[in-house]
Amino acid sequence: MSLDTLPAPNAYDAEPIPAAALAEVERILSTGDLFRYTSDKSPVTLLEDEFAAMIGSKYALAVSSCSAALFLSLKALDLPRDARVMIPGFTFAAVPSSIVHADCVPVLCECGDNYRIDLDDFAAKLPKVQAVIISHMRGHTSDMDAIMALCDAAGVPVIEDAAHSLGTTWSGRNIGTIGRIGCFSFQSYKLLNAGEGGIMITDDPDLIARAVIMSGAYEHNWKKHTVLHEALARWQNKLPLYNLRLNTLSAAIIRPQLDELPRRVRDGRRNHDHVAALLNASPWITVPEKLGPEVRAPDSIQFNLDDLTEAETETFVAGAAASGVKVQVFGQSADNARAFWNWQFLGDTPELPQTRAMLMRACDVRLPARLTLTECELIAQVLTDAAQSATADR
Ligand SMILES: *Cc1c(COP(=O)(O)O)cnc(C)c1O
């Protein structure tokens, strides 16, 4: 069968949860023990210990979402009200939202057409901020050597938003372990799927102790965390309780997926790099190069349309959709949560001309690790054909 006659693969369905989760879920349901602090060794605590060991950090705290982890990170840093927190202009709306939630003020930084932070704009804005959140959007890693050098010199703490970046490395180090705090998501579109959930990691005992208590370890529940009892005792009764804990069932669903991670990372990268090479053969499409120290863990692909008009861009998206491949141009919709001008809750959003220009031609296509190379070739073919037909009338 030729590629042309195959239907486009389903890029939306999740992978099944490993069967090992079922027995544990049944055990938990039979005991009704759903709250992390009713047992001494909850699956949530086990997940924290396993995740910290896997990623190479001292401490981990599992919470209800990555957004909750980002919020708790800002609270753990004890930033004053109205502190300015820099984020990339290209990120998910939940990131500026976590800053607003923490009574701080987001400062948006320009990004380049390779989706990464513009270091000139970053350096220019750094003297006026008290903290930085680096979103590794879709796993694209900004220059962490330059960012850490600038932030260390300025004494500004870095939180890594690695929600969608698990498995990526930078100079051999796991993303999320480079800044003071790293935050990850277990929402269904990320590499580990619990439906909802998140986790924060750090090597700083005082930061994690503050976050543990604020996540809802009321009274002496913090004693059920395996470490840190000295730091935790120091913060007893001193902090508000935001109750952002992770449900035990979610932890039971995530734990057996940790073993799947290397395979998901390997196959996702294989699929991405295969499709990237095919797309780059089109005169209308560019997949930006990754940075040198970065080894990526993608489950989707982003690429730029080169010199297509707005009408041609629309024709391209419609053509790909008609062949079964959904393309999202980040800036070409009135409600995309990754287009900064849609964050109207901020009041006046700043003008970021470079980031806006990138978002107007940057495309997003899902490319899950479970796809075969043949399925990936079909997706690449649909995209290059759609770009060719969209520009045929020139
Ligand atoms: C998904 C995502 C988030 C939010 O994660 P939740 O767990 O849904 O709160 C934040 N930042 C980035 C970059 C994301 O991709």
Image (cartoon, grey):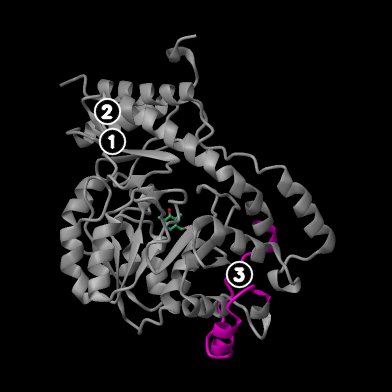
Q: Residue at the location (21% across, 19% down)?
A: 392
Q: CA distance from mark 3 to mark 2?
A: 44 Å
Point out the stretch of residues depicted in magenta. Answer: 224-250
Q: Secondary structure at mark 2?
A: helix
Q: Name the image quarter holding residue 302.
A: top left
- Does the beta carbon of the residue at mark 2 sit less than 8 Å from ligand 1? no
Q: Residue at the location (62% across, 53% down)?
A: 254
Q: CA distance from mark 3 to mark 1?
A: 39 Å
Comes first in the chain, label 3 or label 1: 3
Q: Is residue 381 magenta?
A: no
In the rendered picture of this protein, how many numbered marks are placed on residues? 3
Q: Is residue 235 magenta?
A: yes
Q: Label 1 belongs to which residue?
A: 287
Q: Label 2 belongs to which residue?
A: 280
Q: Secondary structure at mark 1?
A: loop
- Answer whether labels 1 and 2 touch (C-beta < 8 Å): yes
Q: Residue 360's x, y, as percent?
A: 24, 44
Image quadrant of ligand 1?
Answer: bottom left
Q: Label 3 belongs to which residue?
A: 245
Q: Residue 98's x, y, as percent?
A: 42, 69
Viewer-proximal residue, 204 or 246? Answer: 204
Comes first in the chain, label 3 or label 2: 3
